[in-house]
Amino acid sequence: MAAPVKGHKLSTAFGIKGHMWSSGRHEGVDYACPVGTDILAPVDAKVEKVGQVWGAAFGHNSVLLKVEGGYLLFAHCSKALVKAGDHVKKGQHIAESGADGNVTGPHLHMEYQKGPGWVKGGGMDPQKFIDA
């Protein structure tokens, strides 16, 4: 997988413990970046859902991709540029970063889960795929 934002480093790693997350740990990875930063598909995938995918905490313009072995969520977006049913290619511009939902500032939250719904404690580290 390729990184979903170019030139922006990971700001919050997977699994960090804290009271601010409902599962008691961070279930995805965050990239600090200004509102409007291009979010790129890290792999070829099918767009499963767009909008308020896993609840208001993730924002109203999230993008959920069906990927091999699970689902990737891109949350807190200011704008989605794809719709459910679209097929996207690795590197395609699919959304723009934002600060919508439960946030402390603008960033991209990327989360990997086995199923299309959010499961408390069910997140897997998407960074392992990007680093592979």
Image: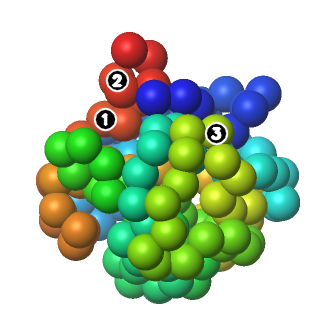
Pointer 3 residue: 91
Residue 123 in the image: x percent, y percent?
24, 49
- Secondary structure type for disc 1: loop
Q: Residue at x 37, y 71 (%)?
A: 48
Pointer 1 residue: 125
Choose between 46 and 63: the one closer to the eye: 46
Label 3 Cα neighbours within 10 Å, binned few <14 / some 14-19 / many ≥20 = some
Q: Distance between the Cα atoms at labels 3 and 1?
A: 20 Å
Q: Nearer the viewer, mark 2 or mark 3?
A: 3
Amino acid at circle 1: Asp
Residue 55 in the image: x percent, y percent?
39, 83
Q: Residue at x 50, y 69 (%)?
A: 86
Residue 8 appears in the picture as rendered: yes
Q: Residue at x 67, y 28 (%)?
A: 9
Whether tag 2 and tag 1 are in contact, CB under 8 A, the answer is yes
Amino acid at circle 2: Lys
Q: Residue at x 32, y 58 (%)?
A: 66
Choose between 107 and 24: the one closer to the eye: 107
Q: Distance between the Cα atoms at labels 2 and 3?
A: 18 Å
- Secondary structure type for disc 2: helix
Pointer 2 residue: 128
| The C terminus - image quarter | top left
Residue 69 sits in quarter: top left
